[in-house]
Image (cartoon, rainbow, N blue to C red):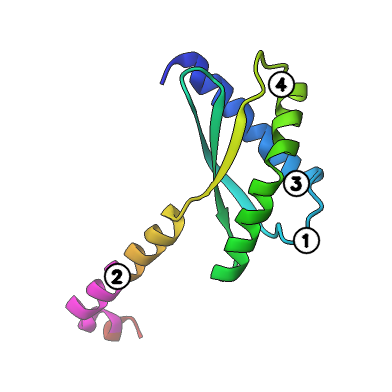
Amino acid sequence: MTTRQDRVSDLIKDEVSRLLLREVRDPRVGFVTVTGTSISPDLKNVRVFVSVLGDLPAREACLKALNSAAGFFRKNLFKNLRLRFAPSVAFIHDDSLDRGDRIERVLRQIHEAEHPADDEEEE
């Protein structure tokens, strides 16, 4: 990624987060965290990675709502960031937080299985 891509990507991440916090009123969009953005080299396409709190149907409904509002985000990114092109926006679920949590639980279980005496001594 070039320096320009990095800067524009960071600006888009901040602006999408702001729009989600202050402008989006869709009830299907619940607790959403923007975890990252990826922009094409020509700055015309952006993928916004989001983490959604809730069960699978709630996540799917939220992603569907976000992607249906892509035009709203595109228009506001173009207007507020004063970009040369209005980038097309696609929202993608980021499951890295879920995977990290799962890895942490497995490591904790392994540690507890290997050191059961440590747990007894602490009590």
Residue 58, how many percent across, how many down? 62, 67
Residue 4, how many percent across, how many down? 51, 14
Circle 4/circle 3 CB separation < 8 Å: no
Q: Residue furthest left?
A: 114
Residue 33, how many percent across, how many down? 61, 50
Say which element carries label 3. Answer: helix
Circle 1/circle 4 CB separation < 8 Å: no
Distance CA(mark 4)–CA(mark 3) = 17 Å
For the point 70% across and 60% down, the residue is: 30
Q: Which mark is residue 106?
A: 2
Q: Nearer the viewer, mark 2 or mark 1?
A: 1
The amino acid pointed to by label 4 is Leu
Distance CA(mark 3)–CA(mark 1) = 13 Å
Q: Earlier in the sequence, mark 1 or mark 4?
A: 1
For the point 75% across and 38% down, the residue is: 72
For the N terminus, which image quadrant?
A: top left
Say which element carries label 4. Answer: helix
Query: Left or right of 97: which side holds 87?
Result: right
The residue identified by callout 1 is: 27
Q: Earlier in the sequence, mark 4 or mark 3?
A: 3
Distance CA(mark 4)–CA(mark 2) = 43 Å
The residue identified by callout 3 is: 21
Is 62 placed above or below 89 here?
below
Q: Earlier in the sequence, mark 4 or mark 2?
A: 4
The residue identified by callout 4 is: 81
Is 1 placed above or below 72 here?
above
The amino acid pointed to by label 1 is Pro
* Magenta stretch: includes residue 69: no
Q: Quadrant of residue 61?
A: bottom right
Q: Depth check: give the residue in front, 30 or 73.
A: 73
Q: Earlier in the sequence, mark 3 or mark 1?
A: 3
